Image (cartoon, rainbow, N blue to C red):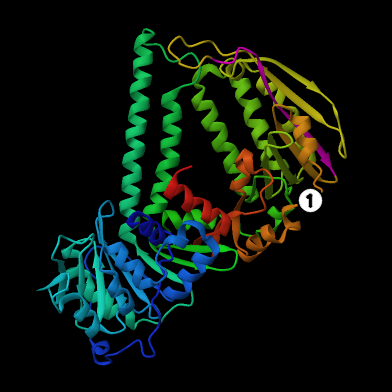
Amino acid sequence: MRRWVTIAFALGALALGCTPKPDPFVDAGPKAEAPVPAPDGLLGEGVLTAPNATWSKLQQRVGGPLAILPMTFGGLVCTWAGLDSALANDVDGVSPAFIVASGKATEPGFVLAVKLADDRHARSVLFDGETARYRPREDGGVVFADGKNGPLTYPVALTKNGWLVVGKSDGDVKALAAYATRTLPQRPLPKEALVADLPRPLFAHVAGKLEALWKGFAADLEDADQRARKAHGGRPPDFGDPAAVIAQIDGFTGRRLAELRDVSKAHVTADVDEGGLRAELVLTPSGEGGPLARYLSGVTPGAAAPVLGASGDAEIALLLRDDAKSRAEDARALDTALTSALGGRLAEADKKKVGQMLADWQRGRSDELVVTLTRAPAKGAVLRTRVADREALQRALRAVPDVLKLPAIKEPLRIKEVTSKNPEVAELGKVEEVVAELAPAKPDPHAKKKPDPSPQAYGLAWAIKDDVAVLGAGEDPARVLASLGKVERTLGDDRVLAGPVNNLGEGVSLVVVAQPLKLDPSRLGAPPAPVVVTWGKKGNEGVVRAFVASPVLKELVKRQMFGP
C-alpha cells in the first residue's frame, strides 16, 4: 500500500483531501508568524493548490489502481507516513500543501507540509488518552510524533502554527518546516494544481551526474577499442574509428551539459483536466551570452498544428522545425562526424560526394519536416516536407545510390547490392526507389542467438508532387510510401488527438505525438490515447510542454504496481 501511495505522489499531483470543515483555519493567530529565509542548499519548492479537487480528478481519470488508494488527502498522507488513519479527518484538504527539497541532488532531503483543520484535535488524537499510539518529543521548535510501537515510515511533526510536516529525516523537518509553513503560504496562490520552482544548483548537480555517467561509458568504449587494436597488432579497426566517434559524441554531450548548467531556474506547472495530465517546464538562462541563451537564439518557433497533417494510423509522428542557417550547420556537422568516424578510409573525392549530398538535402527541404512511424500495414517511416529548392533536393536523393556504393560505407554495412527502380505507387504514380540488399551477418560462435542467414534489404522511395516531397523508408519502401504517402485520415481528424496538440500552443520547434498503447500488438484497435511532448521557446526562455492521456496514465500506474 505504501508503494502505491508513493506512486500517487510521483504523478506530480498529490492532491487528496478530507471532508472540508466550515472554517479550515481554526486559529488565525499562528498565520501571522513572520516568514523565514530560504534554507541553505535549496533544490526545489512547490505548492499543491487544490489537493482535494486534483486528487478527485486523478482518481476519476485514471481509475483502476488509484481507486484502491485512500479517498482523502489526509488518508493518503497518513498511509504514506505510517500514521494512524484516525488523524486523516484532521488534515485540511482544501488549503494548499507545500513541498520543499534541499541538500544534495543525489540524496535530497524533503518535507511535505499540510494544514491541519483542527490542530488541537490532531494533538489529542496523537498524544492524549490511554489508546494514543504516539509520544510527543519537542525538538527544533516542532513536536515530533514518535511511535510507541516502533518508528514511522517517515518522521512526522506538528508545528506551533497548525501544520503537519512529514520529512525524510528529523533534520529535514527541523531545517525546512519553518520555510514550508511560514514563508511559502504567504505567497500568492497559482491557478494550476501543482507549481514548483527549481533553482540553478539542482541543474548543476544533474549535469555533473550525467557527465560522470557519460565519462564512464566513454572510458569503457575506449578500453574496448584499445583491446581490439592490441588483439590486431596495434592497427586501427577495419571499419570506422571508435575514438573519432567518441570524440564527436563527447563534443555534442559537452555542449548539452553546458546548456543544462546554464539554467538559472526552472518553473514547473501541472494540472489535470478531462483528457489527462498537462505539464509545462520553463527554463530560464543565466544570462544573454550564456550557452543556453545562445542555443535558444537558434531555435525556430512556430505552431504545433502541422504535425496534425500526419497519418492517423501513425503510432508516432514528429514535427521538426529549423531555419536555413541551422540546416547548413547541421549538414557540416554531419559531414564532419561521418568523415571523422570513417577516418582515412573515405577518399577525398568520396568526402565531397557525401558532403554535397548532405548540403543539397538541407538546402532542398523546407523549414518543417513531419516524420511518421508506423508498423501497419507496412513497417517503416514516412517523411514529408515542402520543397525549398527542387533541383538541390533531387540531386541529394539521386546521390543516395552512389554514396551507398562507396567502399567505406558499403563494406561495414554489409551492403551486397544497391538497385534502383521506378515502381508505381497508388495516388503518387511512378516513384524513385533505392534498395540496399545486405549480406547475411557472420555467425558469432559466442553468441547465444544465431543470426538470420537470409539476406535483408532496406530502402528509400520518394516522390516530389506539387512542391511537396514524400519519402518512405523501410524493408519495402514503396509499400511504406503507398500506405502513408497519401494521407486519407490525419491525426487532426480525431479531436482526441487534435485537442492536446492545439492546446499546447505556439512557439515550438519540436513536436512528438505518440500513441503508446498502439505499440502493443494486442491493442492495434485501441482508441486514440496520445502522449504529446513539445520543445520550443517563449521569449528568451526554453519551454517543454507535455500531455499524457488518461488511458496512458492508467496503464503506467498499473504496470508500476503490477508489472507488464
In the image, residue 60 sits, relative to residue 490, either above or below, namely below
Does residue 369 appear left or right of residue 272 in this picture?
right
> Is there any visible trace of residue 235 in the rendered image?
yes
Q: Residue at x 59, y 68 (%)?
A: 274
Give the residue furthest to the front: 130
Magenta span dominant secondary structure: strand
Does residue 250 appear left or right of residue 513 in this picture?
left
Q: Residue at x 64, y 60 (%)?
A: 501
Q: Is residue 458 magenta?
A: yes
Q: Is residue 358 magenta?
A: no
In the image, residue 148 sits, relative to residue 330, either above or below, namely below
Picture coordinates of residue 200, whole percent (x, y):
34, 61
Give neighbour class at mark 1: few <14, some 14-19, many 20+ (Cα, 10 Å).
some
Q: Residue at x 53, y 32 (%)?
A: 336
Residue type marked 1: Arg
In the image, residue 94 sits, relative to residue 389, either above or below, namely below
- As rendered, which of 467 and 61 lies closer to the eye? 61
Picture coordinates of residue 63, whole percent (x, y):
52, 61
Does residue 560 appear left or right of residue 168 in this picture?
right
- As rendered, which of 183 and 29 lies closer to the eye? 29
Picture coordinates of residue 45, whole percent (x, y):
33, 68
Quadrant for the N terminus in the image: bottom left
> Is there any visible trace of residue 549 in the rendered image?
no
State which region is magenta.
451-465
In the image, residue 251 sits, relative to residue 154, either above or below, namely above
Task: State the SS at label 1.
Answer: loop
- As rendered, which of 90 and 137 lies closer to the eye? 90
Picture coordinates of residue 511, whole percent (x, y):
61, 53
Q: Which residue is mark 1?
A: 489
Number of numbered discs on residues: 1
| Quadrant of the rendered image containing residue 315 | top right
